[in-house]
């Protein structure tokens, strides 16, 4: 491979095609025509001397060589961007588009406060929120599809702590919230002074599950207690969970801090759980390539400030007689 003839623009095309896996979408993002993107990939293939993509049912499929090249190309492009970016960031004069990946309840709780901060600082910042239906956003961040992921990522955070400074991702804890049992106001158990383990296990349950599995951390704890419960419904949105709980006799377990942003919150009540659960920890996670970017660091600080403890309104804990 002759580096003297390498056109750096081809690497940008390669990066976007790898992220999109579709020439039409890549062309739109690059403000190019699809034939121009195809021509750029042909030139890059000739430069590298190997096939980088094959045709697939939904677009293009990268070869093993392309998969191996992509992380290195991304790092190189990031270094080039950093070299030419300003060393300071003024949100009032420098436009920024931030792509945040998070679940619906996290977005509903964070965004009103964050947008008020951006408005008050007259920031030229646009936000794009991506749905986050997974417990590990590594791929989104490594591919550059999101700048920041916010949510509960216990396994990922544990791996990052173990790797230390060598980890490709960075993390920061934003908040902590205890779990409570949530039910409709007229539920037969809402009038009890304390929810017993027997009554809890005998009830039917709803589980918020991004994976679709009807087995979560509560079920793991119950197994250790030689108990079990019946999960009759698993949904992937907190808002939906609230609406269903308000209309049925199902119970669910939710973080107390998020009760105010679920569906039909005013029709719900919460009770302490009759079992011990570790609190929910919310982290924001980003790729380390952003560490040297002043605009990204500024956005991180705004998210952190907007995530500072807020009153947990919504489903109250008063006993309904």
Image: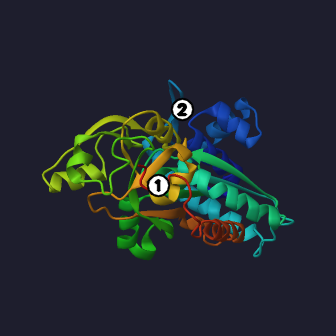
Percent of width and height locating residue 140: 52, 50
Instruction: Tell me whether circle 1 and circle 2 mark residues in contact (CB < 8 Å).
Output: no
Q: Which residue is mark 2?
A: 60
- Residue drawn at 25 percent across, 49 percent down: 219
* Residue 210, quarter of the rendered image: top left
| Position of residue 9 in the picture relative to residue 107 (left or right) | right
Side of 250 where 286 appears, left or right? right
Q: Secondary structure at mark 2?
A: strand
Q: Quadrant of residue 212?
A: top left
- Image disc number at residue 138: 1
Residue at horizontal 65 percent and vertical 66 percent from the top: 306
Q: Is residue 246 left or right of residue 2?
A: left
- Residue 243 versus residue 194 in the image, above or below: above
Above or below for 90 versus 277: below
Outermost residue toward the right in this view: 93
Name which of mark 1 and mark 2 comes first in the sequence.
2
Q: Nearer the viewer, residue 276 or 45?
A: 276
Q: Residue pushed farthest left? A: 226
Label 2, residues with CA under 10 Å away: few <14, some 14-19, many ≥20: some
Q: Residue at x 56, y 53 (%)?
A: 260
- Location of residue 25 (image quadrant): top right
Question: What crowding class fits label 1: few (fewer than 14 Cα within 10 Å), some (14-19), or many (20 or more)?
Answer: some
Place of residue 200 in the rendered image (x, y in percent of width and height, measured from the top left): 26, 47
Query: Of 61 and 153, which appears nearest the observer?
Result: 153
């Amino acid at each position: 491979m002759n580096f003297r003839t390498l056109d750096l623009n081809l690497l940008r095309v390669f990066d976007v095609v790898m992220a999109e896996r579709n020439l039409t979408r890549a062309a739109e993002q690059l403000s190019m025509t699809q034939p121009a993107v195809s021509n750029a990939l042909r030139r890059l293939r000739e430069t590298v001397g190997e096939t980088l993509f094959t045709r697939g049912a939904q677009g293009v499929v990268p070869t093993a060589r392309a998969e191996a090249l992509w992380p290195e190309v991304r790092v190189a492009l990031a270094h080039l961007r950093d070299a030419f970016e300003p060393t300071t960031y003024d949100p009032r004069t420098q436009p920024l588009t931030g792509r945040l990946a998070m679940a619906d309840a996290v977005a509903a709780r964070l965004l009103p406060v964050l947008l008020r901060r951006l408005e008050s600082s007259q920031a030229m910042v646009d936000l794009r929120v991506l749905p986050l239906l997974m417990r590990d956003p590594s791929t989104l961040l490594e591919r550059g599809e999101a700048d920041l992921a916010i949510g509960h990522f216990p396994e990922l955070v544990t791996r990052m702590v173990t790797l230390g400074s060598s980890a490709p991702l960075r993390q920061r804890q934003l908040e902590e919230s205890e779990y409570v049992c949530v039910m409709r106001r007229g539920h037969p158990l809402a009038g009890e002074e304390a929810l017993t383990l027997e009554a809890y296990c005998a009830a039917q349950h709803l589980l918020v599950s991004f994976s679709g599995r009807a087995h979560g951390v509560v079920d793991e704890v119950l197994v250790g207690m030689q108990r079990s419960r019946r999960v009759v419904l698993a949904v992937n949105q907190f808002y939906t969970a609230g609406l269903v709980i308000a209309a049925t006799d199902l119970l669910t377990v939710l973080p107390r801090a998020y009760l105010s942003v679920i569906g039909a919150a005013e029709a719900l009540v919460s009770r302490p759980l009759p079992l011990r659960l570790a609190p929910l920890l919310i982290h924001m996670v980003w790729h380390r390539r952003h560490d040297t970017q002043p605009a990204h660091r500024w956005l991180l600080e705004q998210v952190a400030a907007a995530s500072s403890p807020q009153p947990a309104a919504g489903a109250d804990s008063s006993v309904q007689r």
